Image (tube, grey):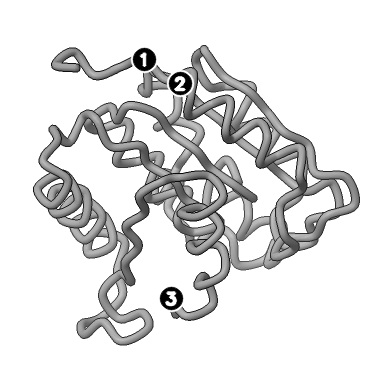
Amino acid sequence: NLGDRRFLLESLQSEHRLSVFIFDYRGYGRSEGIPSVKGALLDAAAAREQLARLAGVDTADVVLMGRSLGRAIAIQRAAAKAPRGLIVESTSSSLKEIAAYHYPALAWLVPAGKLNSLAAIKRYEGPYLQSHGTADTLIPFASGKKLFDAANGPKRFIRIPRANHNDPQSPSYYRALDRFIKGLPKPPHE
């Protein structure tokens, strides 16, 4: 649930001076409903709309950020309607690829198009920052690198040495994040 992200959110707000909006997909944490890909995509679109409304900005001015499963949702949303920037951490090229990695005999059950980040990232045109731990045992580093290689520019990849899937990001990542945010093009109305 979102409680696990408290310290990250505090750091993003206080140390990196970012306004952050986080939410649970339906069926996760305290959110009602039944988890589904379609529901998560709808929830992400609604959250983006709500943040834009609260901040008084256009939805295109919002920077999307996702980690692990959240990366797939953020990439799908970015491909559908480009944000000001896209940041993903510890991510794979597709759900099917991860299923094949962990459950090779059952991977055929996962449709190729379900949360296919590799296909979606090719449709995103905009600033892109991605990080991945070199010792990630949940999502292999090679899968994350494959996704990054397929992305359009401008893009930046941060390798987190010896980091596993849920390990904290490195100081070099946060320096790159600050540079990425500062380097984003200004919204046209500013």
User: Label 3's element?
Assistant: helix
Number of the label disc, if any, that sits on residue 127: 2
Neighbour tally class for label 1: few under 14, some 14-19, many 20 plus, Cα within 10 Å: few
User: Label 2's element?
Assistant: loop
Q: Which residue is pictured at 34% across the width and 41% down the height?
A: 76
Whether label 2 touches label 3, CB < 8 Å: no
Gap in angstroms between the C-alphas marked 3 and 1: 30 Å
Between disc 1 and disc 2, the foreground one is 1
In the rendered image, the vertical position of residue 111 relative to residue 120, given as above or below: below
Q: Which residue does the numbered mark 1 point to in the structure image? A: 185
Q: Which residue is pictured at 20% across the width and 82% down the height?
A: 33
Question: The C terminus lies in which quarter of the figure?
Answer: top left
Q: Quadrant of residue 81?
A: top left
Amino acid type of the residue tagged 3 in the rendering: Leu
Between disc 3 and disc 1, the foreground one is 1
Going from N to C along the chain, the mark reached first, 1 or 2, is 2
Q: How many marks?
A: 3
Going from N to C along the chain, the mark reached first, 3 or 1, is 3
Q: Which residue does the numbered mark 3 point to in the structure image? A: 2
Neighbour tally class for label 2: few under 14, some 14-19, many 20 plus, Cα within 10 Å: many
User: Label 1's element?
Assistant: loop
Left or right relative to 183: residue 63:
left
In the rendered image, the vertical position of residue 21 relative to residue 24, given as above or below: above
Q: Which residue is pictured at 57% across the width and 40% down the height?
A: 93
